[in-house]
Every structure is written in structure tokens, then in C-alpha cells.
Image (cartoon, rainbow, N blue to C red):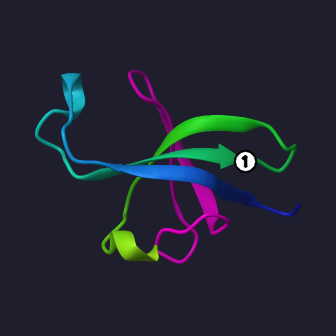
Amino acid sequence: MSESKVFTFTIVHVGFGSREGKTPYCLAIIENQKGEKVTAILEDVVDFSLIKIGIPVKFKRTDETWGEIYSPAFS
């Protein structure tokens, strides 16, 4: 495996905490290069219909509250 990819995901329509009012957003399980899975938020998603299981993603940063943040590799 050469890159991280979406293992599974959901589109969140009702946010909470610091994500309240920032909906919708994509919450995903990302499988990294080592086969490890992490829960992450996908940012830079303009069209949620393009998010599919298996699409490549790239690491952006770690958020102190929400953990790892990724974006689709095609964005």
C-alpha cells in the first residue's frame, strides 16, 4: 500500500462541541500505509458524492481537539 485511503466514512449533519455549526462534514476511518486505522475528519470536500471507500487521502495536520485531519488526494 503506497498511500492512505478511506476505509469507511459517514457524513455528519448534526455537529457537537467545537464542530457544532460546521456541518455537514465527513468523518472517516483512514487506513494508513502500515495498515493501521485511525478516525479522522476529511476536509476540503466540496462534493460529498465523490467520497468513496478506497479513495486516496493525504494527511494535512493534527488538531488538538479532533485528532488527525486528512483531505482527499484529488482535492
Q: Position of residue 71 (x, y in %)?
A: 49, 59
Q: How many marks?
A: 1
- Going by the image, does 68 lie left or right of 50? right
Q: The disc labelled 1 sits on which kind of residue?
A: Glu
- Measured along the vertical axis of the image, is residue 11 above or below residue 55? above
- Rendered residue at 10%/40% (across/down): 21
- Rendered residue at 41%/28% (across/down): 66
SS for tag 1?
strand
- Rendered residue at 87%/43% (across/down): 34
Name the residue that disc number 1 marks: 31
Query: From this viewpoint, which residue is outermost toward the left?
Result: 21
21 part of magenta stretch: no
Range covered by the magenta-colored residues: 51-75
Determine which quarter of the picture holds residue 17. Answer: top left
- Rendered residue at 21%/47% (across/down): 13
Q: Position of residue 16 (x, y in %)?
A: 20, 27
Determine which quarter of the picture holds residue 2. Answer: bottom right
